[in-house]
Image (cartoon, rainbow, N blue to C red):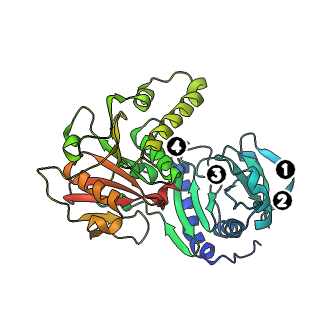
Amino acid sequence: MINRATYQAAQIVAPTIETHFATHLAEASAKGEIDLAPQPPARVIEAILDAAFWSSLRKEEGHSPKISIAFLPPEQATKPLLFKQNLPLNPNVLTKLAPGVERGGIHIGVWHDGYDLYVWGTTLNIPNYCFVVDVSEPALLVVKHRRIYGFGKFTNVAVLKGDQIKIVNENAPKTGECPSILLSLLDLTADSNWSDASNILIQLSVSMRAHGRGGAVLVVPQDTEDWKRSVIHPISYALTPPFKGLADLVRKDRGEAASEIFWQTALKREIDHLAGLTAVDGATIITDEYELLAFGAKTGRANSSEHIQQISYTEPINNAEAIIVHPAKIGGTRHLSAAQFIFDQRNALALVASQDGHFTVFSWSKSLDMVQAQRIDTLLL
């Protein structure tokens, strides 16, 4: 009985998203996982996307809505904030609620009475594989779900920008070697936690994008100085000794659960501190154990190396094939410098954020025998 959407992209993408959630929920159930969210039917997906899209184009007291909508009954939410009367799911209701629920981690709860969808309240906790729609900015919607183990950033399923649709391709890593950060963003790793390597880099990447100034992080092996051959000396902001704020926190043996929230808060503070330094012109250099070696560093071609001529470039979305291009074709100076650095330092990893929000991971592929660049901003939203 739910009305058809007037937002055409919602009609197009809803069946694909329904299949995604049906597949993952069935697999999780077969493995004996508990606390699983209900399966969202295509018509429900379509209706929620439609309401979210039209609300995103409105403003409340001069501000565009930034909200998160979760499809679940209130009984599956832990300590939900329940309205005395259910509210109809429509752009007007979402826009009016937006100022009070725009902080991270708050979800507007949506369920149905068999005929219509309604807003029942808000919640901070949602079950595994819960269908979530984030309104990030006008006309930009991100469909995602909570990771099965509940740690770290949600897993993105699709991104809708106006009439543009991007469906995340979970099979993308089958081409070439895949950096752990991409595997984790695609939710293809086993049980993860806040301190595993890929999760730290994801949180760092999200924080880098947030400051909006662009930046680059070069991750080099611990206890080697080979990277120094690929930077211009003197380095404006070299550190002696290396700064170990994040490294010491990650190495710290955490005790009882009561201290977990404190530890996660401290971790976020150290990550944001590091991400802030990436706004300084030049690259920020850290070890793979998160010791900060320098920031504001200018990279250059190693004396024994040639100029990089081509890279493999792809984005992990459906119908996006890897292409071979010159690194200058995918971005500006940061991208070219990062590609050259990885060409010279093949055990390193480079994370590059553009001012426009694009985000690229550079790594060396042995099977392709070249630098590979993977654009992952669709996964970071």
In this view, the mark in front (3 or 2)? 2
Does label 1 or label 3 sit earlier along the sequence?
Answer: 3
Circle 2: element type: strand
Q: Amino acid at mark 2?
A: Leu
Q: Amino acid at mark 4?
A: Gly
In this view, the mark in front (4 or 3)? 4
What distance separates the C-alpha of mark 4 from that of mark 2? 31 Å
Q: Amino acid at mark 1?
A: Phe
Q: Amino acid at mark 3?
A: Ala
5 on left or right of 300:
right
Residue drawn at x 47%, y 43% is 276
Identify the disc placed on residue 87. Answer: 2
Closest to the observer: 136 or 189?
Answer: 136
Does label 1 or label 4 sit earlier along the sequence?
Answer: 1
Q: Position of residue 110 (x, y in %)?
A: 74, 57
Closest to the observer: 29 or 179?
Answer: 179
What distance separates the C-alpha of mark 3 from that of mark 2? 22 Å
Identify the disc placed on residue 83. Answer: 1
Pointer 4: residues within 10 angstroms few (<14), some, or many (20+)? some
What distance separates the C-alpha of mark 4 from that of mark 3? 18 Å
Quarter of the figure that contains the N terminus: bottom right
Q: Position of residue 304 (x, y in %)?
A: 11, 50
| Label 4–label 3 contact, CB within 8 A | no
